[in-house]
Amino acid sequence: MFVHPEACRIELTYQTFDVHDAPGQQLLVGTLEPGSKSATAPLSLI
């Protein structure tokens, strides 16, 4: 979960990926659930 001062609460689903060229490092990717309130919240910032 991420709280933005203008877009309010945004819930993300996270996945981690190993970075093969950097042992011990991982890439963390957060995605929004399509159609959810969290997916439309960032649009209010435009």
Image: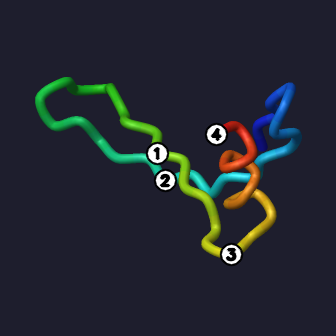
Label 3 element class:
loop
Q: What is the quadrant of the C terminus in the image?
A: top right
Q: CA distance from mark 4 to mark 2?
A: 27 Å
* 3 or 1: mark nearer the eye: 3
Identify the amino acid type marked 2.
Gln
Q: Which residue is mark 1?
A: 29
Q: Earlier in the sequence, mark 2 or mark 3?
A: 2
Q: How many marks?
A: 4
Q: CA distance from mark 2 to mark 1?
A: 5 Å
Label 1 element class:
strand
Residue 16 lies, in percent from the top left, at: 44, 47
Identify the amino acid type marked 1.
Val
* 2 or 1: mark nearer the eye: 1
Identify the amino acid type marked 3.
Gly
Does residue 25 sit above or below 37 in this rendering?
Answer: above
Q: Which residue is mark 3?
A: 35
Does residue 4 sit above or below 29 in this rendering?
Answer: above
Q: Are marks 4 and 2 in contact (CB under 8 Å)?
A: no
Q: What residue do we see at 61% from left, 72% from top?
A: 34
Label 4 element class:
loop
Q: What is the quadrant of the N terminus in the image?
A: top right
Q: Which residue is mark 4?
A: 46
Q: Earlier in the sequence, mark 4 or mark 2?
A: 2
Q: CA distance from mark 4 to mark 1?
A: 22 Å
Q: CA distance from mark 3 to mark 1?
A: 19 Å
Q: What residue do we see at 33% from left, 26% from top?
A: 25
* 4 or 2: mark nearer the eye: 4
Q: Which residue is mark 2?
A: 15
Q: Are marks 2 and 1 in contact (CB under 8 Å)?
A: yes
Q: Earlier in the sequence, mark 3 or mark 4?
A: 3
